Image (cartoon, rainbow, N blue to C red):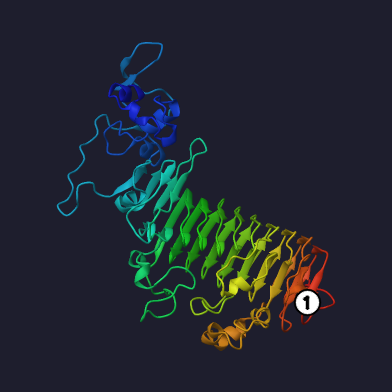
Amino acid sequence: DFLLARANQQVQDCDGIIDPDDRNGTVDFEEAFACIELLDSDGQGDDNLTEIETFSSQPGWREEALNTHYDANGPVLSNQLAPAGIGPLDPGSEPPPPPPPPDDEPVGRLKRKIVVKPGDSIQAALDRIKPYGEVVVLPGVYEEPGDEVNALNITKNGIRLIGKTKKNKRVVLRAREQSAQRNGIAVVPPEHTDCMSCHTDLAPPFPRRPGVPDGMLQETDPWLYDIEIRGITIEGFPNNGLFTNHVDGFTFVDIGSVENKNYGIFPVLSRNGLIADSYASGSDDSGIWVETSENVLVTNNLVEGNVNGFEVSNSDDILLVDNVARFNTVGMAILLLPDIFDDRPSAKRIDLKDNHVHSNNKDNTARPGSILATVPKGTGILMLGTDDAEVSGNLVEDNEFTGIAIADYCAAVIQDPNFNCLVDQDVIDAGPAFIADQAASNNRVVNNTVLGNGTNGVPPFGFLAADMTDLSLAPNGSCYQDNDYGTWASAFLFPGGPPACEP
C-alpha cells in the first residue's frame, strides 16, 4: 500500500497529516502509515483503519493466492498467499460492488466509522455517522464553525468519539474567536440542542425566557444511550466544556477541560457513567460536576485551579476514588442544594475513597452574589446536607480552612442574610421536604489521614478552622473512626471530639 500510494503521488499529501505544524517536505514512516490507514485498499467500502479496528481483518490481504509481496531487497512476487500468522484475512477475492443508495437515501449515506483529520469538521462526521458508530479524530486543533451555541452536538445513541494521540499530540477542540459558542461538546437528545430557546444566558444562574417553566427535563423526556468520548481536550469555552443531559450510559476517558469558565465536565440528569483519567482546570465554578445524576464512577482524575475541583450535587450512588484535587478553592464539594431539589430531591451514598485532597487555597473567583462565592477558600472536603456517605482512606492535607467538614445545609448558611434558610427563596420554593432533608445524616468518616489543615480560618467561620469540622444542628447519626488528625472543631454538638462509629 505504501508503494501504491507513492506511485499515485499520494504520499506527499501525507506530510503533516498527524501534526500540521510538522510539514517539512518529507514523510516519515508514522505519517505514511497514518495516511495509508485512511485509504480503502481493497475497495470494499471501508477504510483500512476501520477494517483493522472494527473487524479485526487485514485490509488488502486475500485468502486466495492473489496477493502481491513487495520486498525492499528482493523481487516483487505476484499471485502469492498471505504471510502466515498475520491475522484474519479478507475472505473475498473480488469485493462485491457497493449497492446503490435507496431512492430516499442521499449519496454519501450514514457510515459506521469515519476518520477525521485536521482541516475536516468533527461535527460533519457526527452528522454522517450511524447510531452506534465511531468517529476517530486525528491529532490537531479543531474549531467548529457550524453551531453558534455548541461547538459539537452528539444526539445519536451509541456514538464513540475517539481522539487519537500520536507523538504526544492531542486532539484539541477550541472555542472560535469572536464566536457566540458557549459549550464545547453537548451530549443531549436531539430535541434539546437549542439551549437558547429556553435561556437568555447559559451562565449561572441560567436565566429563563418568559414563559419557560422552572425545572429541568424529567424522567418522561427523551434519553440518549451509550455514549463514549476519549482523548479530547476542550479549551476556552465561556460556559461548559463537556455537558450531558439525559444520557444513560456514558464513558468519558482522557478528557481535558482547560479554561472552560463555568463547568468543565458536567453530566446532568444522567446515569450509569464513568469519568476517568481526565483533567480539569480554570473553571470559576466546578472542574468536574456530577449533578442530579445516579450511578457514576469518578476515578483517577486530576482537578486543579478551579473554584470547586469536584462537585457532586443532588445525586445518588456516586463513587469518587483515586482522584487528586489540588490548588482549587474547594477540593471536593458534596452537596444537597435547594435550587435543584425539584429536579432530584436526594444526595445519598456519595462515597469518597482513597483520594488525595491537598493545598486547595485558591482565592474564590465564583460569580459574585452566588452561594458558591460565600464558601471559604482552603476547604478540602465539604459534605453539605448529604446522607449515607462513606469518606474513607483519603489523604487530606494543607487546606487552610478545613480538611473534612460535615455540615447541615441550614447550619452552614445560618449567618448569611441572603442564603439563610428562613429567607432564601430557593429554600422556600423547595418547601418542607427540603427542610426535612437538609441535615447531613448517617455519614461515616473512617481511616482518613487529615493533617496540616485549619491553619488560617476566615471570619465569620474562623472558629471552625480545623482538620475535621462538624456543623450539625442535631444528632444525625454521622460518625468518625480511626482517623489520623490533629485538630477538631464543632459549633453546636460535639465540642469534646468527634462521635465514634458503632461497631
Q: Looking at this view, is 226 or 153 the one in front?
A: 153
Q: Quadrant of the N terminus?
A: top left
Relative to 285, 148 lies left or right = left
> Residue 250's x, y, as percent?
47, 58
Q: State the residue lying farthest toward the right.
A: 496
Identify the residue shown where x is 47% and y is 48%: 232
Q: Looking at this view, is 156 or 338 the one in front?
A: 338
Crowd tier of the residue under label 1, counting other residues whose Cα lies within 10 Å: few below 14, some 14–19, many 20 or above: many
> Residue 183's x, y, as percent?
43, 60
Q: Looking at this view, is 126 or 285 the one in front?
A: 285
Q: Looking at this view, is 292 or 259 the one in front?
A: 259
Q: How many marks?
A: 1
> Residue 149's x, y, as percent?
37, 62
> Residue 451's x, y, as percent?
79, 60
Q: From this viewpoint, is residue 352 visible?
A: yes
Q: State the residue lying farthest toward the front.
A: 178
Identify the residue shown where x is 48% and y is 43%: 170
Give above or below for 272 relative to 115. Answer: below
Give above or below for 298 relative to 375. Answer: above
Relative to 503, 259 lies left or right = left
Provide the secondary structure element on which disc 1 rests: strand
Say what amino acid the circle numbered 1 marks: Ser
Q: State the residue lying farthest toward the top.
A: 74
Q: Quadrant of the C terminus?
A: bottom right
Identify the residue shown where x is 78% and y is 75%: 463
Identify the residue shown where x is 33% and y is 14%: 76
Would you name the residue on which mark 1 appears? 490
